Image (tube, rainbow, N blue to C red):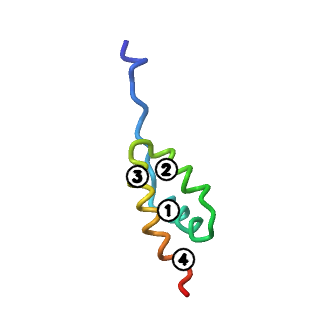
Amino acid sequence: MGLFNRKPAQATITAAEIDAAARGIARDDDTLANELCNRAGKDSRSVAMAILARSVDYTPQN
């Protein structure tokens, strides 16, 4: 029966969520980044790389 064989819908991760997670990473808080990666499922690597790339803009430079 098709009703029980459906795959869950792909989670949509917005740019604002990636930006917020990147700010958290820059403040040494990975909670939101972990949640987004878990929600992304098979695309978690791409989401993690996007978060890390964006976090560079918020990391204090010495």
* 3D distance between C-alphas at marks 3 and 2: 7 Å
Cα–Cα span, label 2 and label 4: 20 Å
Name the residue carrying label 2.
37
Amino acid type of the residue that numbered disc 3 sits on in the rendered structure: Arg
Q: Label 2: how many residues lie within 10 Å, few (<14), some (14-19) or many (20+)?
A: many
Residue sitting at the far bottom: 62
Disc 3 versus disc 4: distance between alpha carbons? 21 Å
| Mark 1 residue type | Ala
Q: Residue at x 51, y 58 (%)?
A: 17
Q: Which mark is residue 16?
A: 1
User: Mark 1 and 2 residues: CB-CB less than 8 Å, in contact?
Assistant: no
Is residue 7 or residue 56 the one in the foreground? 56
Query: Where does label 3 land, which residue?
Result: 45
Q: Residue at image x 41%, y 36%?
A: 9
Residue 5, relative to residue 56: is it above or below? above
Label 4, residues with CA under 10 Å away: few <14, some 14-19, many ≥20: some
